[in-house]
Image (spheres, helix red, strand yellow):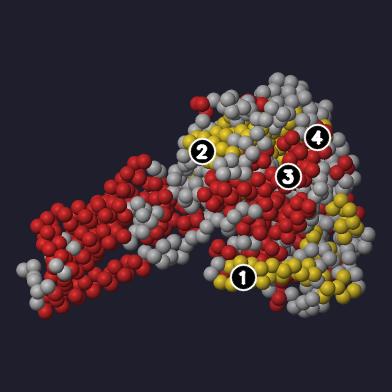
Amino acid sequence: MVRKLTKTIIQMSVVLVCIIALFIAFSIPFGIIPPLGRFLFPGGGLWDIPEDVVSKDTITVTSLSADVTVFRDEWGIPHIYGESEKDILFALGYVQAQDRLFQMDMARRVTRGLLSEVIGEDAMDVDKFSLNKLKEYWAQQTLDELKASQDPIDQIIYQEIVAYSEGVNYYITNMKFLPLEYLFLNFKPRIWEPIDTLSFIKYMSEDLSWSYEDFTNLKIYDSLGLDAYLELFDLPYQIPVTVDYGEYNSSLSPLAAFRDHKEITQIQKSIIHDLTDLFSSFITDIEKIPGEKRLMEEKEFVGSNNWVIGENKSESSLPILCNDMHLGHDLPGIWYEAHLVNIDPLSDFNVYGFFLAGVPFPIVGHNQYIGWGMTNTGFDVIDWYYYKGINESHYWYKGKETAYTFIEYEVPVKNQDSVLFNVKNTVHGPVMTDFVESTSRSGREYDVIACKWIAHNVSYESRAIYGWIHAKNRDDFDEASRYFHTPAQNIVYADIHGHIGIRPTGKVPIRDDSNIPSWHFGNGTLPYNGSAGNGEWIDYVPFDFLPNTENPDQNFLVSANQISAGPDYPYHLQHPLEINRGYRARRINNLIASEEDFTVEDMKSIQLDVYSLKAGNFTPYLVDVVNSISNRDTIQQSALDFLLDWDFVMDKEEATPTIFYLWIEIFQEETFNDEMNDKDCPRIPSHTILEILTKTNESSIWFDNINTPHIELRDEIILRSFNMALNGLKDYFETDDVSQWKWGDINTKYIPHLTGLSALAYGPVGVDGTEDTVNPVYRKDIWRNNEVELSLGSGGASERMIVDFNNLNNSLSVIPSGERGITISKHYVDQLEMYLRGEYHVQYFSADTVEKFQEKWIESRIYFKAGGN
Amino acid sequence: MNVKETFSQVLSFLDKRASYMGFIFCFVFALIFVFTPLWQLSILASFIGGLFYKKMNKGALIGSVGVALAWAIYIVIEISSTNVSTLFDQVGGIIIGLTGFGWIFILVLILLGAIFGSLGGSFGSGIRILFEIKQGKTSE
């Protein structure tokens, strides 16, 4: 008996220990993996996450003034019908939260410096840097001014933002499950505030206009000298966005104004060297801040196309407006489509557009009268200043000891006390050098760097968009555009009356360059001596003096991030390094100029065009050189045969694009890398510069390799690059069979999830195009460290929109993700798959009443009932 | 009649039906508990089932089968009516870095249910044995 008792107790003890061990093991998190018991086991966690919204839902809301009906179509896109805009935007807030809550939550946290609250102190540097950029501060100032404004339209906008926030919060407080990302990160969304919405404008402004290019520009200038700078960083082949300010030609460079500046003297050179050292260490340290390096790299992705054709170009004699904005791709995508209709008989509010999840107004879209689209201008709206610091509280400014001002923040941190953080400001803006290693600056004459940025202002972009969505004609549109300050955009316009136009729009500073040193280019293109009071912002280019074209004789307008205006335009607008080199603009202009009677189908084919103008311009030179080889080997002959047959289309199924693309990358490097490395120049000249040298000067000094004793000419470099490309591809593909070197095997697109978790990502998949085709794919070079490396493209068109003013119901769109961010929803990547196939969806825009929205279009519906107390 | 006598009579009643009642109790409770967010209750379900048996290995067997079956039924219903298998694929990818192996995760879950059940069941049987020893009885 005793033995049995003992044995049982021992066995039970073992079992009990096992039970306790399992209880503990399944109740504690491991890294990013949450407690597995709650997360995986039946009864909660994953098992509670529904696939999609219920097919029919009725929700009673006391704050609504009347009922609102939401129909989701087959792509999950909401069509919202209400009797007031406030009610409609409440419903929009609800459905956006239903679809994109995690994305909205994280975007506002990144912008407002609230990541540490949910991630912990690991995110503290990111939060501090974000707060230091003053996005939160100026979003709050904007909100305060909007709230206090006596202007009735400002009041309407404020009330609508509040109504939208209430819709988001209604969802947050009543939701029955948390998306997968919340389960993993183990936190719950905080209530949505109106400032969250306003902070998104600062977020977009940062994405599109925050720049460190002043430092890069100085280093290029310093390393190459003026003449080489002007030759190698010029902007040939530019076709201005606006057509009323003259044309650039071979004798007239966009950089012509810089020629007046003197060469750098030896004394100045030593000053600049010291500055570039400071700036280099500054940039090196800034790159270490998570997110900042990505922002720098994403500058490569920032592009876009828009164009509009007028009556003589359109088959219907009414305009067609097209827009595809190029950004880094993520899942869920940045854009959220929605259709908003006010069914009050006194209202004609009917808008279809692309919204940022978190913002109740569409960034691009159309109503039943007008439409608009955007591309980034590259306006130079951030200046960097260097100062002589005195101590932690003072710096030199115009010969006086001047005190910094401080803005105090309390940063909430997960599982610990909040951290106090002070943003230190000079008269220009926030000091950024506190984020770099102090040792790298010690002993320097100038040791403080601060910036002044256009987003450091109260701005009313929401009022601009409010005006656009209610505009009935060009005058209404222009009046609203006055409020669009940042990020500056080329805004293309068309209406049902047949008018077309384009307007690079945004607030652009005018600097006082009266006291800058003789070597300085001025206009904010290089860092300024802040202590000396150089480069003060004294005014802004008046809205009425911004470049603008309406109803041009050519009957079409195109923008693809090229130069905004021709040589007759008097103001400096763009940073030279931020002007696109222009292949997309040239191609679109060529396509539209050469044809007439365009239809929506034609517009689709232009948006999806992957013809490489670059290949068309370079390949004849390559073919000539290869043809001249007397004893071509098998691979050379095979590659030549492919090149001779090629139509310059960057088709993923073809091998020739692979040969050309690798060759052009190597040709660029072989031409310039020797000098650029020798002079420590931070950037390599562009393909357009290479194009002009190839076409006009086969014995240019840049073709010569300075590391060899003899003088190389263009054709020798072309051939060497060609052979290197063939060898690289042979090694990469492990075959001599050139036909196997398919472009789609090396030119791939990978769409990451916001969290970076690869299991939630899409791809990689082979795609057509390059960064210079109208339908682009942006990624790093494939020729790295003298070998071919697969490079995953993660940028491109972030939406495609075609608006047909002959029949707005014929308008089309698509986004490279899906409407819902829920990873198991059928709308997570449904549109991405259409996008990759080159397909579009209709917008059901003609359904301007509940009754007109046909039953067969409805996938699910929500009825918001007013009242219910 | 005091509590001990009542409990003895209850055990005696259960003994006569132990072979199937223990399993049914364990299975039914486990099935009810999968609709609560408390996964720990699966051990309680098998513990109750284990009380029917005088051998710990038998309690463990019944507990494991009862809980595993309840979890398997719940999982099959969920998978057939929702897209949760895709979710498990994604979660598998996040945790082990490979996608397409969600079904392995699901099998592991059922296996874990069986382990919880066996531990709870054997512990229940152990309590039963201890009680009977205290009552001066043995199962042998």
Q: CA distance from mark 1 to mark 4?
A: 47 Å
* Res A248 seen here: no
Looking at marks 2 and 3 on the same chain, the residue that comes earlier in the sequence is marked by 2
Mark 2 on the same chain as mark 3: yes
Query: What amino acid type is highlighted by mark number 2?
Result: Thr
Q: CA distance from mark 1 to mark 2?
A: 41 Å
Q: Secondary structure at mark 2?
A: strand
Image quarter in which the N terminus of chain B is found: bottom left
Image quadrant where residue B11 sits = bottom left
In front of the other: A823 or A163: A163
Q: Secondary structure at mark 1?
A: strand
Disc assigned to residue A418: 1
Q: Is residue A191 above or below residue A644?
A: below
Q: Secondary structure at mark 3?
A: helix
In front of the other: A816 or B21: B21
Q: Which residue is mark 2?
A: A58
Q: CA distance from mark 2 to mark 3?
A: 27 Å
Q: Which residue is mark 3?
A: A157
